[in-house]
Image: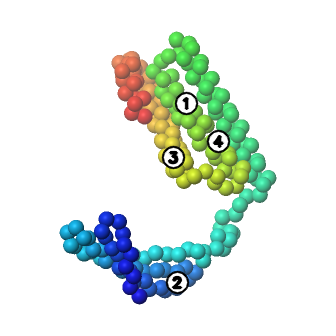
């Protein structure tokens, strides 16, 4: 059975479907020939589409168990407490360091970078995680899922990089104290922060 379906801008596709049953899914194979009306060229490709309408989500329920309501509530409460403590502690850290001139040092600037990454996790990622755990499902759209994945990875990498920068800072201060002021100038500290 050959069918011709018009596509956009003068291109048509000829499809000859064949069906074959594999397990519980149906594979449909199309041989497509594209004719371009502008330069009279023809190209062909072989595409296989899979129909998952016969797939039963309950068939793998034992692999991905949904936690009981009590477990979800306990997990959500623990994460809520962690989120509140992280948010308040990191906000207080910023307030104290920015308020007192004597605390505005290169070492504390690196600590504030770590704190900023933690603040992002506790304000962006954790609330969505708490909602998802307490409801037992993802209530948001795919864009938010991708954005949260990106933000989470950036903040986690930022946290690790900040810990590395703080470790180098402490190493230079303890092992090479005479070089510390030369290495950790305001300009160099800014480069460390940008590099994180």
193 over 70 or under it: above or below: above
Q: Give how far across and how far down residue 43 sits, in percent.
A: 27, 74
Mark toward the start of the polypeptide (3 vs 2):
2
Q: Are marks 3 and 1 in contact (CB under 8 Å)?
A: no
Q: Residues within 10 Å of mark 3 (few under 14, many from 20)?
A: few
For the N terminus, the quadrant is bottom left
Q: Residues within 10 Å of mark 2 (few under 14, many from 20)?
A: few
Q: Residue at x 67, y 55 (%)?
A: 137
Q: Residues within 10 Å of mark 4 (few under 14, many from 20)?
A: some
Query: Which residue is tagged 1?
Result: 115
- Helix, strand or loop at disc 3? helix
Q: Give how far across and how far down residue 125 sits, in percent.
A: 59, 42
Query: Which residue is tagged 2?
Result: 22
Mark toward the start of the polypeptide (4 vs 1):
1
Q: Residue at x 40, y 30 (%)?
A: 194
Query: Which residue is tagged 4?
Result: 127
């Amino acid at each position: 059975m050959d069918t011709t379906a018009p596509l956009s801008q003068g291109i048509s596709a000829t499809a000859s479907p064949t069906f074959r049953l594999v397990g519980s899914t149906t594979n449909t194979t199309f041989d497509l020939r594209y004719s371009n009306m502008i330069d009279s060229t023809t190209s062909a490709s072989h595409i296989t589409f899979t129909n998952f309408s016969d797939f039963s989500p309950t068939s793998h329920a034992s692999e991905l168990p949904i936690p009981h309501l009590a477990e979800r509530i306990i997990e959500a409460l623990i994460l809520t407490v962690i989120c509140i403590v992280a948010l308040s502690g990191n906000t207080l850290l910023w307030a104290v360091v920015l308020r007192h001139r004597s605390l505005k040092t290169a070492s504390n600037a690196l600590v504030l970078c770590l704190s900023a990454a933690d603040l992002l996790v506790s304000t962006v990622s954790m609330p969505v995680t708490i909602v998802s755990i307490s409801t037992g499902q993802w209530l948001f759209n795919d864009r938010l899922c991708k954005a949260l994945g990106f933000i989470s990875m950036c903040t986690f990498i930022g946290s690790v990089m900040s810990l590395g920068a703080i470790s180098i800072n402490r190493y230079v201060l303890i092992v090479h104290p005479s070089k510390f002021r030369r290495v950790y100038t305001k300009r160099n500290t800014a480069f460390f922060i940008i590099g994180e």
